[in-house]
Structure formats: C-alpha cells, structure tokens
Amino acid sequence: MPKTAVEATELAESLVSECLPHSMLCWLQNMEYHQLVAASVGGGNPPPPPEKTPELVEAVSQSVKSLTELLKPAHTRGPELEAQILKMFAAFNLYTGDQGKLNAMLEVWADELEEYPMYAIRKAYKWAIRGGDKLPSLAASIADVKLAIGSNVLDRKKALTQWLTM
C-alpha cells in the first residue's frame, strides 16, 4: 500500500493505464474517445473489446483487485475518517465550544465522505488547508475528493470490471 495520498493517486492512475496490457489500454482510450464523440455528434458503434485471452484476463483481474483494495471506501477504515475530518476542522479553527454542533458537523461530513477512498480524502484535505483561508463547503470538498481519486480511475475501473464479466 502507498504511504502517501500522492503515491496512492499515482498508483491508481497507473493501474488503469501503463500497468495494463497495451490492447486493453488502447480499448479504454478508444472507448473514452467514442463516448466524447457520441455525446457531441451522436451515434456510432463503440469499439470492440479486446479478445479475452487467459493472460489478458489475469492482468486485468490483478489491476481490478489492486484498485478495489486501493479504492476501499473510508467507512471500512474505522475511526480514521472522523480523525481526518476533525483535523481539517482544527486547521480551520472551528472549535467554538459547542460540542453538539461539532458532533453534528462531524457526522454530516463523515456520512457524505464515507464512500470515497481515504487517500483521496487526505489529499483533498491538504489542498483545502494549504490553499484556503476558511473551511470549504462540503460540496466543494466532495468535488476535490473526486478530483483527488485520479484521472479516469473510477470510470476505467468500471469498464475493466464490466469487461471481465462479459
């Protein structure tokens, strides 16, 4: 497992790109291009998926398995999610003495962030405290978490998983 959020993002991105066999990577890129073109001009058949050889299935299965582990939702990590949120609250000096309000905010944030991977939450937290003067909205934080997951990681994982079940 990666030690930092940056390493985790890089690993996730490599698992859906350069770690894949060339034929699978080309298919994913062609699928993404097709989706862009189909959205703007419509129609057309999607590119055919690569043939399922035992070697290709094994390589894709390994990538999906590693991605599944890396992208585990934060709620599976126990109290780590709440600790990360409390650190962000502390960084923006939200402790007003009203413990009830703090607990309610913590619960709302944890409920909304629990489905995302912990590394992406940590990365977005660092962006927030290094680049802002005040606590970002929950919506802005979720957008940053999605961005921190990595480029095309979730979409490509979904496509790889679907290819394996075809």
Image: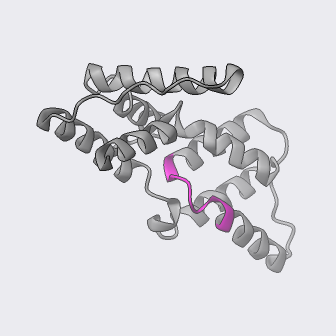
Tell which of 70 and 58 is nearer to you: 58
- Residue 82 lies in quadrant: bottom right
Q: Write the residue at 35% across / 33% down.
A: 15
Up/down of 55 relative to 158, above or below: above
Q: Write the residue at 20% across / 39% down.
A: 57
Magenta stretch contains residue 51? no
Image x and y of residue 9, in percent: 47, 35
Up/down of 96 relative to 15, above or below: below
> Please, which colouring scheme is shown?
one colour
User: What count of labels does the image hold?
Assistant: 0
Q: Write the residue at 71% across / 35% down.
A: 130
Up/down of 90 relative to 5, above or below: below
Which span is picked out in magenta?
A: 111-119
Image x and y of residue 146, in percent: 62, 42
Would you say 166 lies left or right of 85 here?
A: left
Would you say 75 lies left or right of 15 here?
A: right
Would you say 76 lies left or right of 21 here?
A: right
